[in-house]
Amino acid sequence: MGGEAAARKALARPTLAMLPRVSDNLSFLYVDICRVVQTDTGVCAEVAAGPGSVHRVPIPTAALACVLLGPGTSITAPALATFMRHGTTVVASGAGGVLHYGSLVPQARTTLWLDRQVDAYSDVTRRLEVARAMYSLRFGEDVEEGTGVERLRALEGQRMKALYRQLATKHRVKPFKRNYDPESWDEQNPVNKALSAGNAALYGVVHSVIAHLGCSPALGFVHTGKQHSFVYDIADLYKAETTIPLAFSLHDSGTPDSTARFRLRSELRLYRLIPRIVRDVQQLLDPDLDAEEESTVPDRWKVVDLWDPGSGTVAGGVNYAEDGA
């Protein structure tokens, strides 16, 4: 098996996790090793309960923001159609929500957050503002207005070096240098292995949230040139409190990669971040957003808006012909 294939395989192992609510009526649900079907009463997950016996668990489609289908899961077309009608994003994921293979976003989903992402991404001034806001969120300190990307990169490098030194001292390990080389996976030290495995798990969860919001994972503000650039941007906000400390704590583990995945899943560290990831993405793309106005599920029956260069949008479904025209 090639080095890259071995590295990818090492980053994905099966597990099961229940995901938290984004709000009182919006939840993320992970399912695996079952068949999701439409019955006369609604959508259910069918699980084998013995020879010739099937146990059905009802799925509350109306209250779901996103459902993640893990390994060993199949879904029927009628069940998928019901999810789409209820505005539920459906994600094909790796075990435990790790890795993101693809997603189906309901056609009624608003492009609100994608529009705001593109607006900020396409304007150099706004893009810098978002990059500075990301730095502030990540390290808990303000950045002067006008700080350029070169300075941001330097500040980020300084903070990460300091964090690595602090954790290396705490765990009494030699000075650490971050390295991910899929061609020499087995030769990497335990901290690097654990960090790569933990980051892969974090990327999967972040990607699912971004898909649910309808944003583009490719349009990053700090990272660029990859289909996952925005995923890397958002995931970086949480590494210093999740995957990095965990990786250093596994410096003497014989199985650092699998142990990192198990710890992150069993303790639900990443899944507890989901409501926070939603809020952070929304605040980054719209700093003036009032918490009361946040909406992760659109009005499903709203007619599409029309673009206007002056006001931004005008209502669709309206005849704008002049009287007598």
Image: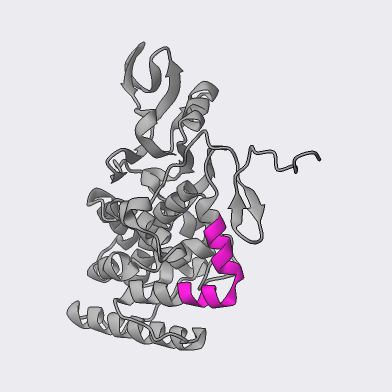
Over which residues does the magenta segment extend? 115-130
- Residue 94: image x %, image y %? 44, 45
Which quadrant would residue 16 be assigned to in this image? top left
In percent of the image, x 35 and y 38: which residue is there? 29
Q: Is residue 215 visible?
A: no
Q: How many numbered tags mark residues here?
A: 0
- Residue 123: image x %, image y %? 59, 72
In percent of the image, x 39 and y 52: which residue is there? 205
- Residue 47: image x %, image y %? 35, 23
Residue 6 colored magenta? no
* Residue 291 position (above or below residue 174): above
Q: How is the image coloured?
A: one colour
Q: As drawn, which residue projects farthest toward the front?
A: 324
In percent of the image, x 29 and y 80: which residue is there? 163
Q: Is residue 201 left or right of residue 148?
A: left
Q: As drawn, which residue projects farthest toward the right?
A: 325
In percent of the image, x 55 and y 77: which residue is there? 125
Frontmost residue, 87 versus 80: 87
- Residue 42: image x %, image y %? 40, 19
In what quadrant of the picture does the N terminus appear? bottom right
Q: Is residue 279 visible?
A: yes
In what quadrant of the picture does the C terminus appear? top right
Q: Main secondary structure of the magenta part?
A: helix
Q: Is residue 119 left or right of residue 267?
A: right
Residue 121 colored magenta? yes
* Residue 291 position (above or below residue 71): below
